[in-house]
Image: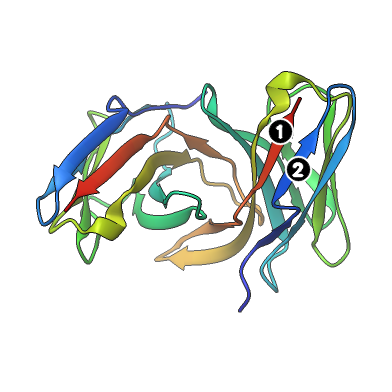
């Protein structure tokens, strides 16, 4: 099975612009989560989509948005870019795992999109 | 809100040695999952090991094992017979379970940069 893919891998933008990042989950996975990784703040949860619905959202401003399509592919958009938005943006797709009587979702990460805002 | 703390920003050991990475967390939940993820330089994040809080037995995966102390809210990772390929950032992460399908958000620690020297 192909892994999680993210495009583009690298992106350079200037302040005030907007950007769209794309994530294709592992085939059959219906959940996609997005994380922002920076040296200062570490890994922070942005949002999660399941069956085209945003089900969970992190503590980020409204400039950060996302959506999921019927084929489970997801995009995230950042409008009015700021210098502080420079980061590695990771996407993870999720499959259900059963351990005894418990069910949890194991997340598989993509390689990330490195966004640089100048 | 849950928090995860990794108190060792960097560690360095010689090949074949054993190394232990520390992680503590704070939660009021009784049931949850804990993970160690590995992020090699310029490569994607992969799951190393998982622990369910309701299981008293410590998880092991080949050379990787954990010491899970629920009362102390401690979750350390031991890497035995370390190899050059173990060089990476290691993240401890917490997940609260849910009955719903789809991913629950991961709360990550700040990471420990581990270098294995030849």
- Side of B73 relative to A77 (left or right): left
Q: Pinpoint the chain carrying mark 1.
A: A
Residue B108 location (% of width, % of height): 47, 35
Label 2: which secondary element:
strand
Q: Pinpoint the chain carrying mark 2.
A: A
- Determine if residue B70 is in view: no
Query: In which quadrant is the N terminus of chain A drawn?
Result: bottom right
* Residues at marks 2 and 1 on the same chain: yes
Residue under the image location 59 percent in, 55 percent down: A111
Mark 2 Cα shell of 10 Å, populated few (<14), some (14-19), many (≥20): some
Q: Which residue is mark 2?
A: A11
Q: Which residue is mark 1?
A: A116
Residue B20 location (% of width, % of height): 18, 41
Residue under the image location 9 percent in, 51 percent down: B17
Residue under the image location 30 percent in, 33 percent down: B23
**Is mark 2 in CB contact (under 8 Å) with mark 1?**
yes
Q: Quadrant of residue A54?
A: top right
Q: Which mark is residue B38?
A: none
């Amino acid at each position: 099975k192909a892994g999680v893919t993210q495009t583009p891998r690298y992106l350079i933008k200037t302040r005030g612009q907007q950007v769209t990042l794309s994530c294709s989950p592992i085939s059959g996975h219906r959940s996609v989560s997005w994380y922002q990784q920076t040296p200062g703040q570490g890994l922070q949860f942005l949002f999660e989509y399941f069956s085209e619905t945003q089900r969970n959202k992190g503590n980020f401003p409204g400039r950060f948005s996302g959506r999921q399509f019927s084929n489970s592919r997801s995009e995230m958009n950042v409008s009015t870019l700021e210098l502080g938005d420079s980061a590695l943006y990771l996407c993870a797709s999720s499959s259900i795992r059963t351990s005894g009587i418990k069910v949890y979702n194991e997340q598989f990460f993509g390689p990330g999109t490195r966004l640089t805002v100048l | 809100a849950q928090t995860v703390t990794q108190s060792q920003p960097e560690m360095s050991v010689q090949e074949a040695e054993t190394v232990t990475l520390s992680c503590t967390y704070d939660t009021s939940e009784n049931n949850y999952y804990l993970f160690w993820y590995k992020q090699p330089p310029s490569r994607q994040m992969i799951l190393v090991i998982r622990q369910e809080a309701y299981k008293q037995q410590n998880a092991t995966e080949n050379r990787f094992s954990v010491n899970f102390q629920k009362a102390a809210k401690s979750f350390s990772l031991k890497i035995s017979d370390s190899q050059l390929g173990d060089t990476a950032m290691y993240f401890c992460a917490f997940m609260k379970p849910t009955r719903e399908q789809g991913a629950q958000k991961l709360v990550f620690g700040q990471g420990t940069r581990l270098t294995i020297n030849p």
